[in-house]
Image (tube, rainbow, N blue to C red):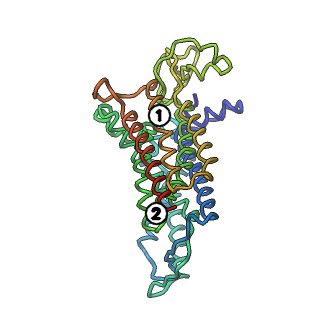
Amino acid sequence: MFPTLGHLINYLFGTSVNFPMPTYGFILVLSFATSGIVLNMAFKRKERLGELKSHKSKELVSGPINYFDLLFSSFFYFIIFYKVVGIIFEYDIFVKDINSYIFSLQGNIYAGFVAAIGGFTYSYLSAKKKFSEVPKYTEVDVFPHQITMNIVMIAALSGIVGAKIFDILENFDSFMKDPLDQLFSTGGFTFYGGLILGTLSVGIYIRKRGISILQMLDSGAPAILAAYAVGRMACMLSGDGCWGIPNPEPQPEWLAFLPDWMWAYNFPHNVIKEGIQISGCNGEYCYMLDVPVFPTPFYESSLSALFFLIVWFVQNKIKAPGTMFFIAIGLNGIARFFIEKIRVNNEYHIGGGITQAEIISSLLVVIGIVGIIVLHKIHKAKG
């Protein structure tokens, strides 16, 4: 496993660099970048087909200087340079405990003030060039692909909040024992929480801009699947505990063509330091599982990549707007429901025991099927 990017770089290139950026966080960012690329491609495709139109937006040409914005941007520059330069000059302290350093008052105050003054001066001079007593606006045509970055940022921020909220609900006992650790830990995110809150937030944003909800859902379907495929590799590569149940059985002969780790894996050097001590290992991450488990993050990532390809290549054959989204969530729901049977998760005491993901995935399958049927009937009725 690769708890940090340094571990991954050293493994790939045989180096010995000490680069403490968490692998989980880096790949999570990469997953949002992937979703942005795919979403942009989907938007441009629908714009070419005439399924998505531009919308009018007011753009400020000139106006009074907004000193609140100037001060806010200066504060932002201060924080960034205060921390970044502090990390550069206090790297040894930073690598010992990344979270503690980031959320502490440690940093380089001189760099912070220089950046704040420089940022304020630049922003002020730029604003002065557009100064006028009365705000003047012009209307411009904005196409959906031009606001891809806005959508991704909204989805990312609301998705992270939603994923953290659902994780807290799923592990409420752990949260009550140490709320701050659970809130600010780099792990502990529930995909469905991110999907639900992210979709709602983006829906509100695009609705205000007059973009078709159904066309947006279709464009977002492959982006969500691609992001999930990449994001699940964060769990796999870091070993964050989102693995399967113990699997001590030998690999079946009919699967002999696959690497052993695809059947059962003990996640050596996992980021949560779970399991037994690795003999001869010196360092912080020297643990592996005593009994190998199903590598469920790999299964989820692979299936999501497959679903992405299916949705991407059949989209030209689907005529009813919104159908692709319901196909995507239905496929994801089916896969997640069955993977839950071999995955470690907290259960709610309902019936014989059921997990949060089993409840949500079951609902997604039902919603997916109903959505496909309803949209098909509506499209057929319209001729």
Quick check: 295 above or below 376?
above
Determine crowd level at label 2: few under 14, some 14-19, many 20+ residues with C-alpha closer than 10 A. Answer: some
Question: Mark on residue 92?
Answer: none
Could you tell me if residue 91 is visible in this image?
no
Q: Residue visible at 66% across and 21% down?
A: 258
Q: Position of residue 25 (x, y in %)?
A: 52, 41
Disc 1 secondary structure class: helix
Residue 336: mark in rendering: 1
* Residue at the spot 61% in from the left edge and 35% down from the top edge: 6
Task: Answer above or below: position of 93 versus 156.
Answer: above
Task: Inspect the image, locate mark 2, and give the three-letter code of the amino acid beneath it.
Answer: Ile
* Residue in front for this viewpoint, 149 or 124: 149
Q: Is 136 above or below relative to 321?
A: below
Q: What is the quadrant of residue 337 in the picture?
A: top left
Regarding residue 195, the answer to whether it shows in the image is yes
How crowded pointer 1 is (Cα within 10 Å; few <14, some 14-19, many 20+) is rated as many
Q: Position of residue 224 (x, y in %)?
A: 52, 47
Q: Which residue is mark 2?
A: 206
Give percent across and percent down for residue 122. Answer: 55, 72
Amino acid beneath label 1:
Arg
Discs 1, 2 touching: Cβ within 8 Å: no
3D distance between C-alphas at marks 1 and 2: 28 Å
Q: Earlier in the sequence, mark 1 or mark 2?
A: 2
Q: Nearer the viewer, residue 354 or 73?
A: 354
